[in-house]
Image (tube, grey):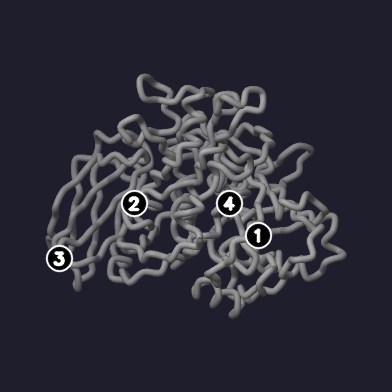
Amino acid sequence: MKRNYTNLLFTSTLILFTFIGFAQQTRLASPERHQIDWDICIYTPTDEAALINNARREFVKDRMENRIAPCSTFNVNYGSGFASFPQAQAAFQFAVDIWSNLLSSPVDITVTANFDPAAPGNLGSANSDGFFTLTGPGIPANTLYPAALTEVLLGEDVDGPGGTSNDINANFNSNRSDWYFGTDANPPAGQFDFVTVVLHELGHGLGVLGFGRQLTSDPNLGAIRFSGDASIWDNFIDGADIFANPVSILDTSAPFGFPDPSSQLLAQFQGGNLTINSTLAVMQNGGVPPQTYAPNTFNSGSSYSHLDEDTFNGTPHALMTPFSAPGEANHDPGDVILAFMEDMGWPLCDNTFSTEDFLLNNIQLSPNPFTDTITLDLTSNIASQEFDISIVDINGRIVYNQFANAISGEIKIHNLSNLKNALYFLTIESKTSDLKITKKIIKQ
């Protein structure tokens, strides 16, 4: 059964500092390319009746209908099949335009798309055309980034084999008579919404993917790393120890870690306890770590790299669940996934999150990057409030916390020189109202 949406308990988060500036400040080294091909997602149809249709958020609808310049440019190479299905190509472009008004990129994102016959249980599939290693402050060690996100962080195009600059490969099943190619998020009963499927698969190509898998060579073992490297998604996933405490899925240490490969790791993929520890995604989920799909039988192409089916179907976050129903339309990724993508490094288009915290939007923070001190300049209408200031590292640990009142409209945060050079999240929360905001900051 589709679930009803529960309103978020926490206020949506505004992020004003983008990773484009981060890349320029950290001077990331030239990346090494890795080609990794496996079934991240085979988007599967289900006969379950849909109870919800999610249209574009108003912010995106306004930008598209008023032809406002998008925040990123997608170049699509329409390959085999699309020439015979112009309606499919138009619906594909509509999905592309939604993503281009949600994510910001200084580099064009190139997609190769095919519309060819496939097995009946396959609506579509996609993968990043290569993964890249990056080094620099705030970049986790032994971590691979998908091609499109790599280019965002570097601020430049990264060529693949033969000098090609393709970022995403996407394939969709033309051997179906039940596609709905409309763009109104209102497919008839019995038809599958093509825009939804394209949005879903492009999401995987943009980075909504992990490397967790069941080994074909030994089905008793689960694995994550390829040649010692995990994905940026994997860095934000927690399993659970025997006491139900969250443990990073990448923690291999005894006694409660998960060797890679191992039966313990496979048990995590099949235990129903995988959660996302992304600071921003947790905030968008009402302070609760969002669950990912971890059914008791590993389902290649569905398990691990999706939001949990039972938790998020029928909600505004349903796009990145593993199944799509006839009559269901999801034309928005939902704030949980967008926040998670922000934590992974994607800059979001201005005003992507709907929020009432516009007063905090005017807080000025400097310098950023910082060395020892950060100054917050407050507007006069909130300068008299008391604030809880906290700094959290990329692993979710609170490394600084204080209550503060403004003096002459300013709050100064001192004695930060002992922090390691890295990316952090600065949260400013009013103690006398419900105003709250989180900003990304860099220690250098």
Front residue of 94 and 376: 94
Front residue of 242 and 286: 242
Gap in angstroms between the C-alphas marked 2 and 1: 27 Å
- Do we see residue 154 in this rendering? no
Marker disc for residue 322: 4
Gap in angstroms between the C-alphas marked 4 and 3: 41 Å
Q: Which residue is mark 2?
A: 288
Establish if 73 lies above or below 59: above
User: Label 1 sits on what residue type?
Assistant: Val
Q: Is residue 223 left or right of residue 379?
A: right
Gap in angstroms between the C-alphas marked 2 and 4: 21 Å
Gap in angstroms between the C-alphas marked 4 and 1: 11 Å
Gap in angstroms between the C-alphas marked 1 and 3: 44 Å
Q: Which residue is mark 3?
A: 432
User: Label 3 sits on what residue type?
Assistant: Thr
Q: Are marks 2 and 4 in contact (CB under 8 Å)?
A: no
Mark 4 is surrounded, within 10 Å at the Cα level, by few (under 14), some (14 to 19) or many (20 or more) other residues, namely many
Q: Is residue 358 left or right of residue 78?
A: left
Q: Are marks 4 and 1 in contact (CB under 8 Å)?
A: no
| SS for callout 1 | helix
Residue lying furthest bottom:
66
Q: Mark 4, mark 3: which one is toward the viewer?
A: 4
User: Label 2 sits on what residue type?
Assistant: Val
Q: Is residue 35 left or right of residue 235?
A: right
Marker disc for residue 197: 1
Marker disc for residue 211: none
